[in-house]
Amino acid sequence: MLGGSAMRLVKFAKECKDKKLRSFSSYKTKKKLSEVLEKYGIVSCNITRILQFIPRK
């Protein structure tokens, strides 16, 4: 398929723009960070429980 990889990249970029993702370090208060971590199933403030990103080959 001609341009398949490029089209996937364009689609991914559009999705990222729509979601407006934020890094965990951008939250200004500990309370806000705790709320977001709870949303992802991390109840304690122990950041070592956050799974590391493992890239696919």
Image: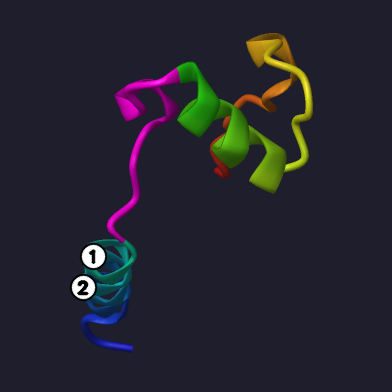
* Element on which disc 1 rests: helix
Tag 2: Cα neighbours inside 10 Å, few (<14), some, or many (≥20)? few
User: Relative to residue 55, is residue 49 depicted above or below?
Assistant: above
Q: How is the image coloured?
A: rainbow
Amino acid bearing label 1: Ala
- The answer to if 27 sits in the magenta stretch is yes
Residue that badge 1 annotates: 13
Quadrant assignment, res 55: top right
Residue that badge 2 annotates: 10
Residue 30 in the image: x percent, y percent?
49, 18
Q: Which of 40 and 1 is in front in this view?
A: 40
* Element on which disc 2 rests: helix
Q: Which mark is residue 30?
A: none
Residue 43 in the image: x percent, y percent?
78, 28
Q: What stretch is highlighted in magenta?
A: 20-29
In the image, farthest residue toward the bottom: 1
- The answer to if 19 sits in the magenta stretch is no
> Could you give the CA–CA distance between mark 1 and mark 2, rounded to whole angstroms?
5 Å
* Residue that appears at 34% across and 50% down: 21
Q: Nearer the viewer, residue 41 or 8?
A: 41
Residue 57 in the image: x percent, y percent?
55, 43
User: Relative to residue 50, is residue 45 depicted above or below?
Assistant: above
* Residue that appears at 40% across and 21% down: 29
Residue 48 in the image: x percent, y percent?
70, 11
Quadrant assignment, res 42: top right
Q: Nearer the viewer, residue 46 or 17?
A: 46
Q: In which quarter of the image is the N terminus?
A: bottom left
Examine the residues drawn in magenta and state their main secondary structure. loop
Q: Is 7 left or right of 42, judged from the image as shown?
A: left
